[in-house]
Amino acid sequence: MILNAFFKAVGQIGDPRFRKVLFLGIGLTIALLFGAYAGLLWLIEALTGEGTVIFGYEVTWLGDLLGWGSLFLMLFLSAFLMVPVASAITSMFLDEVAQAVEDKHYPRLPPATRVPFFEALRDTVNFLGILVAANLLAFILYALITPAAPFIFYALNGYLLGMEYVTLVAIRRIGRKAAKEFRRKHLGTVWLAGVLMAIPLSIPLVNLLIPILGAATFTHIYHALNARP
């Protein structure tokens, strides 16, 4: 069922609404990372000023050194944060992906309840915080148990992605409380499908498609599970 749902999602990847959400998510992510870097540079300049006095001597190159250091730091962090940040931001617009899937594959369904924008924004901020914090903390486990690092990465992100996407899809149909009960009831299937979404996260560029494919895949999974007696 999971693979069938995934291949149906891949088959619809050229849908104009899929592309719209993808480009919107990537654009906002890049803008956010640039904005964070600009804010960091402003903070460095504010702290160092015209020059910093060390042992009675004015040092004017400290700001430049910190500025270049911050550039390399942002490039390093972006390599790890680009995907989770893009996933979180794109999740604000995945309702449109789910609707595109239902329009094509489940046209007889009644209209879904759209999640209000500010409610979706709140969920996105919460998801982003959990996703980034969990992946940063996972670096400790990667260092302690290096051979198990790939399995920890896939298990952790698979769980987080599965919980997020199935809730996003289910909440449109049965409400927030019932959506949480639904994902708890089908935890094994949701987690396994989430791991399938997490595996391509390590492939550059392909990983940016994961939010779109995830929402589409879990839309099929939700309706397949919901159809069972």
Image (cartoon, helix red, strand yellow):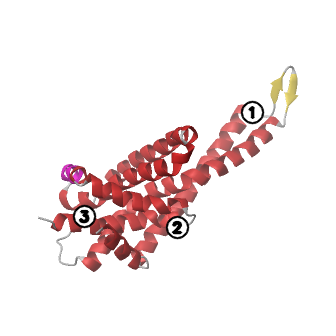
- The one nearer the camera, 159 or 83, is 159
* Kind of residue at disc 1: Thr
Mark 3 lies on residue? 222
State the image coordinates of residue 79 (x, y, percent, origin top left). 61, 54
Quadrant of the rendered structure where residue 69 is? Answer: top right
- The one nearer the camera, 182 or 108, is 182
The mark nearer the N terminus, 3 or 1, is 1
The mark nearer the N terminus, 3 or 2, is 2
Per the rendering, the mark at residue 16 is none
- Magenta-highlighted residues: 176-182
The quadrant of the rendering that contains the C terminus is bottom left
The mark nearer the N terminus, 2 or 1, is 1
Residue most extreme to the front: 147
Helix, strand or loop under label 1: helix
Going 45% across and 72% down the picture, which residue do you hit?
20
Residue count near mark 1 (Cα–Cα under 10 Å), binned few <14, some 14–19, many ≥20: some
Mark 1 lies on residue? 48
**Does the residue at mark 2 contact the one at mark 1 (Cβ under 8 Å)?**
no
Mark 2 lies on residue? 206
